[in-house]
Amino acid sequence: MTITVKALQKTGPEEPFRVTEIERRDVGPRDVLIDIRAAGICHSDIHTIRNEWGEAHFPLAVGHEIAGIVEAVGSEVSDHAVGDRVGVGCLVNSCGECTACTDGEEQDCTGGKGKKVGTYNSVDVDGSVTQGGYAQKVVVDDRFVLRIPDALDFDRAAPLLCAGITTYAPIARWGVGEGTKVAVLGLGGLGHMGVQIAAAKGADVTVLSRSLKKEETALKLGASRVLATTEEDFFRTHRGAFDFILNTISADIPLDKYLGLLRRRGVMAVVGLPPEKQPVGFGALISGGKVLTGSNIGGIRETQEMLDFCAEHGLGSWIEKIGVDDVDAAYDRVVEGDVLFRFVIDTSTFDSAEGAEKV
């Protein structure tokens, strides 16, 4: 038995999205069936389905920012019940046995193919390719289903399942808190969450951007100020000014110069992924004992912690809501930086979509 649902798929990187019918597995003993109410669009979706990160498995539905309501649960599920408000992020399975998994960092699972399973474009335990959240419903192992607090509406909560945890994890890991001087590089889908989270932790937040055009928005998000990196002598003027830098930029930047903005023992956490390798001089790290570190989403336990934190502090993604027919155009706008700050697909628009076909 399988469950037939409408989804939004591409059959190739140059093809447009089209509404199709896909099969979800029947609800197993440890599974949860979710009626998807909102599906966020992440830049990773675009990279994947345009084959910018290697060959994708087509036909493919992407989307790993999923929010909805539990429609059914398996016989062995006790943590979730029909009617619960839930979400699914970037993972739908892991081995559960390696040290990463037992430490609650499933995103770093070393179990291998068919063990660590991404929400889309990944080989599932049964050998099939996972299809993501641009769909009406999804079936997920209950270990990877998260509780969405009542204080978070689905539209603003969906992007938290990627952008929220991606920025929350390094902020929490490196002890950002009251009085920490934080710089956020870039004010996009990731950066706007980093500003909100760091400010809610009590940090003094500065946004670093090439211009001041987003200054008003940055202040509304909780930043204390915006500095333009194109100002004359910027890097000399602000040398040693920050305890922690959250680098959300997915483009080439002069890392050595930005590391110079850190105080002694300061930390730069990188969450943006540029297309090319980035050079860094070891002297910029050795001088002052600075730390350059990366961070990749977060584990299930920490993601739940993030959702609860956002609910407690009234945080959420700034979004623009679109229908299933608008996704191709939305992708172009994301690439052009023409969105404030995330697109979220209204999955109720599947109901009126015509021409669904099996692929």
Image (cartoon, helix red, strand yellow):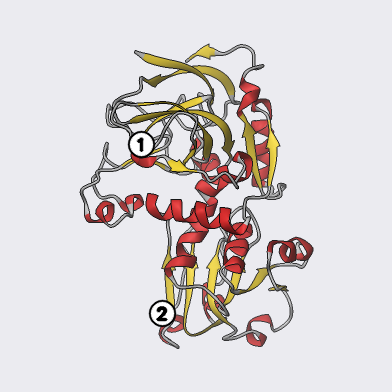
Indicate which disc residue 142 carries. Answer: 1
Q: How far across and down, in percent of the image, does residue 196 sit?
A: 62, 62
Q: Amino acid at mark 1?
A: Asp
Furthest residue toward left: 97
Q: Position of residue 227 (x, y in %)?
A: 71, 74
| Residue 306 in sight | yes
| Mark 1–mark 2 distance (CA, rounded to whole Å) | 44 Å
Residue at horizontal 53 percent and vertical 12 percent from the top: 357
Q: Which mark is residue 282?
A: 2
Q: Position of residue 134 (x, y in %)?
A: 54, 30
**Which one is closest to the eye, mark 1 or mark 2?**
1
Q: Tell me which residue sits at (63%, 33%) in the image.
A: 345
Q: Is residue 138 above or below residue 177?
A: above
* Whether residue 47 is situated above or below residue 283 in the rendered picture: above
Q: Earlier in the sequence, mark 1 or mark 2?
A: 1
Name the element at disc 2: helix
Q: Residue drawn 69% across and 84% down? A: 233
Whether 36 is drawn above or below 104: the answer is above
Q: Position of residue 283 (x, y in %)?
A: 43, 84
